[in-house]
Image (tube, grey):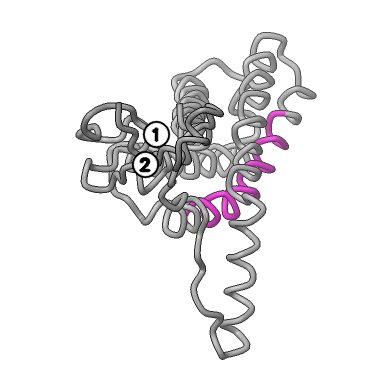
Amino acid sequence: MKKWRCGVCGYVHEGDEPPDKCPVCGAGKDLFEEIIETPPAGDAAAKEDKPAETALPPDPRDVDMGPVPTTPLGRVLHFVLEQMLKHHAHPVSVHIPNGVLPVAFIFTILAVLLESRALETAAYCNLVFVVLALPLVLFSGYVEWQKRYMGLRSRQFTIKIGCAVAVCVLSLIVVVWWTVNPDILQVPSSGRTVFILANLLALGAAVVAGLIGGKLVFRD
């Protein structure tokens, strides 16, 4: 049975033909390359039962940044982007909203149930931290998408980018709303319900984006 590697994310498919779309990143079948296995040469090698040699296409995630620019600013930018990709800035930084948003939401619900100002403050501080981290998360995600995944506009990436924008917008709205009206959780009202719903939607969007990102990283 033949093996095919996705030229965008590196997913390996077994079958006579590549899939119509990559199940991980959504790339079309024309972006798949066949993995060629070459049997060992000579009778002696065959008798020793040596494994076949596999000729792998280049891993698409081994990014070639191209030539270094000649201008000082260009060299600095080239170095920064290279280091971001080399050290996986996006998968690392995205742990901040994915890890802190659930904590902030739990604190928010507990603050309402227990009428606790301390828990409100904890939830607010966590959300501010998320908002401050989001510029790095979004920028590193854009760099990763463009350089490592060829800027592919598949359904998976469209959903992931849409969720990232939703997290950013909703988190910013919640923090600004909470700053302007620090007593939003104190009195039962339709405004408080909408406020909590905005927190929940931001958390849900982060979960969806994280699930898609996990599939891209682990390719399963």
Q: Position of residue 208 (x, y in %)?
A: 44, 28
The residue that disc 2 covers is 35
| Circle 2/circle 1 CB separation < 8 Å | yes
* Nearer to us in this view, 135 or 213: 213
Describe residue 29's horizontal placement relative to residue 149 as left or right. left
Dot 1, crowdedness within 10 Å: few (<14), some or many (≥20)? some
In the image, is residue 101 above or below residue 140?
above
Kindly identify which numbered label has been placed on residue 165: none
Quadrant of the rendering where the C terminus is positioned: top left
Note whether residue 46 is visible: yes
At horizontal 28% and vertical 42% (from top left) the residue drawn is 27
Dot 2, crowdedness within 10 Å: few (<14), some or many (≥20)? some
The segment highlighted magenta reads 123-142
* Nearer to us in this view, 19 or 93: 19
Amino acid at the residue labelled 1: Val
Quarter of the view holding residue 100: top right
At horizontal 64% and vertical 41% (from top left) the residue drawn is 130
Amino acid at the residue labelled 2: Ile
Decide whether residue 140 is among the magenta residues: yes
Furthest-top residue in view?
113
At horizontal 49% and vertical 53% (from top left) the residue drawn is 144
